Image (cartoon, rainbow, N blue to C red):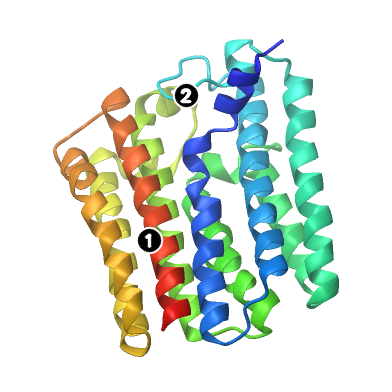
Amino acid sequence: MASAGQWLEGARPRTLPAAIAPVTAGTGAAAAAEGFVAWKALLALLVALALQVGVNYANDYSDGLRGTDAQRVGPLRLVGSGAARASTVRAAALACFGVAAVLGLVLALASSWWLLLIGAAAIVAAWFYTGGRRPYGYQGLGELSVFVFFGLVATVGTTFVQAGDVTTASVLAGVGCGALACAILVANNLRDVDTDRTAGKHTLAVRLGESRTRVLYVVLVALPFAALVPVALAHPPALAALAGAGVLVRPVRAVLGGARGRTLVPVLTSTGSALLLYGVLLGAGLALG
């Protein structure tokens, strides 16, 4: 049986900023629209965290069955390493999705029924990222899904359930958070590009090649700060989110400098930290503005 520490590592805590940042940014946008509701913000955060951990366990399960985790460069995978049975990891993933579904149902009943459809789509997208007969994550579409669900949907949805409206600030914040979340995935896939290519996992990094993937990473980490400009014109305190750019200097240098394999692990950590800082400071700036 896997230890508690191994289960925690399998949950991939470095990816949790992708769940926290859009909710904090969306809550700030709700506050800017005078619609902040604390309990709804908390439920939205718990839904996002449950989905993130759920998709991590689901990926662990599906990749482990396919054997694509046989040669790991990154963190421990429970199934691939043999630390836990595949059925147990699948049950953990489904349990997380169940928590997200129940909490999402409460938010939908308190806001709008059609949110149920979006929640169902998010769970389906999470499972079939690496699950099913033709996982779309193996076809180079993972970044698109991350941008939509951990960027636009998470941010705009958080604002909507509180303020009952979709604001320009929430959409732009979603673009920024989504781009940085995609940058985490791009760095992850750049790290695993050789093993993924060997395993037949055609991620976007495999399809683009290393050189163009490195350029894509830089574009993705620059986009959030471009999106910040129109937000700051209406809410000047939102400029505090520029602090996230300072955290990205070293990872950008590493990516452009040709870092490969394990040397890209700090890039993942720093990009996650930048995303968290961006989301929190943007949310705070919007609330204050």
Residue occupied by mark 2: 75
Above/below status of 22 relative to 113: above
Residue at disc 1, secondary structure: helix
Which is nearer the eye, 37 or 136? 37
Q: Nearer the viewer, residue 85 or 108?
A: 108
| Residue lying at 81% horizontally and 46% vertically, measured from the top left | 98
Q: Residue at (49%, 28%) from the top-left corner?
A: 200
Q: Is residue 113 visible?
A: no
Q: CA distance from mark 1 to mark 2?
A: 25 Å
Quarter holding residue 89: top right
Please identify the quarter of the rendering in which residue 86 is found.
top right
Give SS at disc 2. loop
Q: Quadrant of the C terminus?
A: bottom left
Disc tally is 2
**Three-letter code for the amino acid on which mark 1 is drawn:** Tyr
Q: First in sequence: mark 1 or mark 2? A: 2
Image spot of residue 7 (x, y percent): 63, 23
Q: Residue at x 52, y 20 (%)?
A: 76
| Residue 13 appears in the picture as rendered | yes
- Work out which quarter of the rendered image holds the N terminus and state it: top right
Q: Position of residue 156 (x, y in %)?
A: 58, 73
Q: Nearer the viewer, mark 1 or mark 2?
A: 1
Graded by Cα atoms within 10 Å as few (under 14), some (14 to 19) or many (20 or more), the crowding at tag 2 reads few
Q: Amino acid at mark 2?
A: Pro
Seen from the viewer's position, the closer of residues 214 and 91 is: 91
Which mark is on residue 278? 1
157 w.r.t. 58: above or below: below
